[in-house]
Amino acid sequence: MATLSDVAKKAVVSKMTVSRVINHPDKVSDELRELVYTAMKELNYVPNFAARALVQNRTRIIKFLILEEMDVTEPYYMNLLAGIAKELDQNHYALQLATRLSHEIGPCDGLIVTGMRKADYDRIIDKLERPVVLFGQNNRGYDFVDVDNEKGICLAVRHVIDLGFKQILFFGIRLDEPFMAARIRGYEKTVRRHKLAGRVFLMKNSSHTAQAQAIALLTELHGKVAFICASDRIAIGVVRAIRAAGLAIPTDAAVTGFDGVFLDRISCPKLTTVRQPVIEMGQECARMLLKKIDMDDGHIGSRIFQPELIIRESTVIR
């Protein structure tokens, strides 16, 4: 059976270099990493991570704790999970999915937490005894990854203004959370800058709720209208309402969503949406957490990703 020394000799590097490639591949050059990986493959060398974990008092397990109901978040979290799992796999960590009822079952080296609400900090997050990275902005000093929510909505509002819409409504999620406050702020700042009257409607993140609200509004509105929605799920409900009212999309009414994860592509017409790079954001969550673990729970800070406006048939005739 090949040893670490055999790999070092084959790659013509030191044993310390091989160890760094195995344990901290992000800290070595691509060329050096490829050299060691090639030697490992040729020698059929498999690192004993279980033994190393015992020596380091590590479990090699990361928990992904989702604190909201998962039935309303699919398929968003599947993309996030894919990104987290991809990064952890490259660093030889296992991923365990946990909920608010199961997160204390079994040990782990750290947690990535999402779906948190204000009450969750005192009840759950502040009591966690392992390194934590949050997926979502927070004002409690925790390291986090998020998208620039304010900028994303600004992009959508400017888009429909450029198309000539003067009557622009915002359909948001009824949550007193930083991400939602940022999206409302982006909407209000942009309509004010263009001297337009804005109207904000907050509701459950449900296509059925959004459809009912839009139907009620469409009976009283006159002229062209654009709906800026805080999620693709809400936007799909608005699309159904516009069709039920016998109006044409996008000439009579335009719709934009937010997320860009699957739902925007199955809508008919396909949704113009603000895309979050969710897979990449998941990878960054994992990278930050592994770095915190290596730093014995040191402070990392935050990483804000840039949104992208994807223009489709719900705002522009193709």
Image (cartoon, rainbow, N blue to C red):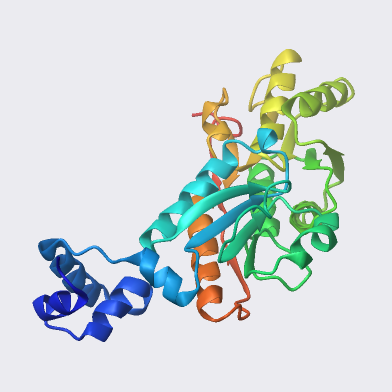
Give the mark count.
Answer: 0
Q: Is residue 217 left or right of residue 7?
A: right
Which of 101 and 69 lies nearest the eye of the viewer?
101
Q: Is residue 7 left or right of residue 214?
A: left
> Which residue is at a point 71% across and 65% down the rendered structure image?
128
Quadrant of the image for the N terminus? bottom left
Q: Is residue 252 visible?
A: no
The quadrant holding residue 285 is: bottom right
> Which residue is at a point 72% across and 40% down the rendered structure image?
228
The quadrant holding residue 199 is: top right
Where does the image place residue 15, in percent across and percent down from the top left?
22, 83
Q: Is residue 281 left or right of residue 249?
A: left
The quadrant holding residue 170 is: top right
Q: Relative to 223, does residue 53 appear above or below in the rendering?
A: below
Which of 4 and 113 lies nearest the eye of the viewer?
4
Where does the image place residue 21, in percent across and percent down from the top left?
29, 75
Q: Residue furthest right?
A: 220
> Which residue is at a point 56% across and 24% down the rendered structure image?
269
> Which residue is at a point 71% across and 50% down the rendered structure image?
115
Which of 200 and 38 lies nearest the eye of the viewer?
38
Which of 8 and 58 lies nearest the eye of the viewer?
58
Q: Relative to 204, does residue 187 appear above or below in the rendering?
A: below
Where does the image place residue 42, in percent across and percent down from the top left?
10, 63
